[in-house]
Amino acid sequence: MTEAVLELKDVCFRWPNQNRATIDLPELKIDQGERIFLQGPSGSGKSTLLSLVGGILVAESGSLRVLGEELKSLSRARRDAFRVTHLGFIFQLFNLLPYLSLEENVLLPLRFSKKRALRAGRNLAERLEEAQRLLTALGLSEPLKEGRPVVELSVGQQQRVAAARALIGRPELVIADEPTSALDADLREVFLNLLFAECDKAGSALLFVSHDSELSRFFGRSLSLPQINRVSRLEAA
Amino acid sequence: MINLIAKSLWNRKGTALLTLFSIAISVALLIGVEQIRKGVRTSFSSAVSGTDLIVGARGGSLQLLLYSVFRMGNAPNNLTWESYQDFKKHSRVRWTIPFSLGDSHHGYRVLGTNHDYFKRFRYGNRQRLKFSEGKPFSGVFDAVLGSEVARKRKYRLNDPIIVSHGTGSSSFLKHEDRPFTVVGILKPTGTPVDQTVHVSLEGITAMHIDWESGAPPMEEDRIDNEEVLKRDLTPEAITAFLVGLRSKIHAFSLQREVNTYREEPLSAILPGAALQELWELLRTAETGLRVISAFVVLAGLLGMMTALLSGLNERRREMAILRSVGAGPGTISGLLIGEALLLSISGIILGMLLLYLLLFFAQPILQTRLGLFLPLTPPGIQDYSVLFAIVIAGMLMGALPAYRAYRQSLADGMSIRL
């Protein structure tokens, strides 16, 4: 039996100085290679949930396992290492370090995880090749060839560089937090198709978070955070 | 890691370079002050060499050193020619050089002496005086110029010079009736010799022969120069004299002998001991300079800390990205410390380059203008330990921003709050 990539049970999280919980999730499970759309308006606790999955925040109660590993049983340093080894992140905007080149941005996670670096390639040359392959596959061969600085890329191009970074070294789970909200409708679809193709190739599961329920049609399974989060249901009642 | 720090810094090169320069300049100042201090000491110590005792009228030893060797200030009193002769003929004395001071030429002191000066006087590392042009004085109205006097006043051989009475540069009383002729110009020594006009003791006597208690003669009392040369020009008094002994062992006993001389009150000093007294006196000023330059370095480092702290807010995105790719808060604060280290170390390197470049170009100017020779010596152990302390201080200055970044990245996590 294969382990679920992500498995949450009765996870409850409350920010300090707040008397109400932000997250109270009875269950959420993502299988290997699965694509899940998680819809939720802003303020529904999306970012908090992603920080919990990333091991930046720790749940008050309940169980949160990534690849079978209970995150709260790990030390903070181990959680940082675990995050980079098994997860890739894409954010809404400003994903890239302006002072690094395209390839250096893509290779960034490999500096912090030896395991992930080895999965990307046996040596520096191989890893660089893999970064270039990903960038080319994501339609960035031109700025790559020209050696353009990342600040000169369009938002769509920047998001694709971020996708390449999230995918390098084939992490088991890619988490995308509103990656398309700054893109036009047609670019959005192009981006999604490229992202899906590369996730499949890498064998990575994808947790795609957005407020835009219209995107759910691209996904096999979609969930609504306000519906599964008990906090929001109470509020609605 | 260093690669990442360097690239991140280069991305903020405006602030980073300003910070770097302020550290570099403060380091150059700190080490420069130290170099000048050493240079001044060497310069002072090299003003006289090979002299065992300096004898003058009774007074403070520092005062005697200053007016005899450094031509600073004035002698409280003269000593008689007879006393001088007594010690000159002393069995333990090998040589003496008489000094007669009190007149000046455009602010340069005029020194009356004899040929022993050119034969026996040593400076620096027992170097003897050398002529760049001409020869020692032989006539009563001959003069030998120090190199700076000749250069600044553009004198050549055979030029006439007029000596002023007294030592102020704006002295109104001039020995206009008895001009001297330049017969020799000395090579630069980097000592007060360069700023001195040398004449014979007889020349000094001749200038003042018809003067009455510090005032020029009335027209009818004036003695013309032909007549002067026929007179006995042996001086009645001199200001001081340098003594070289047959054996250095007797320096203290002869010093005691001078200090207890019955004929008139005299003082003898050992140049080394008097210099030591001078250092004691200068120590406070030196310490003051050092403290000031240390504070300038501190200000430079504080500037760096301010720059790092104020940059933190703008760099939240950078930190969040690094967090998302696995950097822990420890790594983030490590980046800040690394940045402070990189800035202080490169600031020090740049500062030292700046200082040596400056010294290289300022050296000839300082030597000719101030008579101060600053050798281009590599930094000493003391300098290195100061520089090391600056690196440590720089790292400590990075600690506060690092701590703030640590807290900030713990709070922000991966989310970017702008």
Image (cartoon, coloured by chain):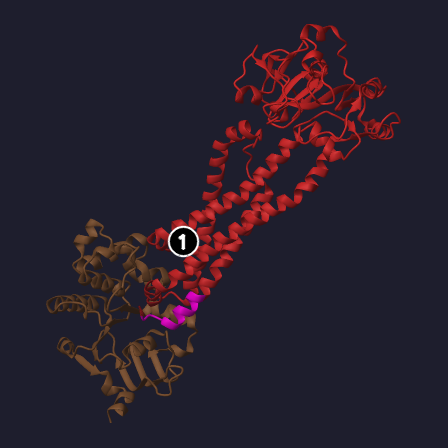
Residue B12 vertical placement versus A34 (above, below): above
Please name the residue that numbered disc 1 is placed on.
B2
Instruction: Name the image quarter holding residue B278.
Output: top right
Residue extent of the magenta highlight? B404-415
Residue at point 78% right, 20% down? Answer: B237
Secondary structure beneath dot 1 equals: helix
Q: Nearer the viewer, residue A130 or B33?
A: B33
Q: Which of A16 and B209 is in front in this view?
A: B209
Whether residue A180 appears in this view of the structure is yes
Whether residue A3 appears in this view of the structure is no
Question: Which chain is brown in the rendering?
Answer: A
Q: Residues within 10 Å of mark 1 (few under 14, many from 20)?
A: few
Residue at point 56% right, 19% down? Answer: B150
- State the image coordinates of residue A1 (x, y, percent, origin top left): 28, 79
In the image, is residue A11 part of the stretch drawn in magenta?
Answer: no
In the image, is residue B410 part of the stretch drawn in magenta?
Answer: yes
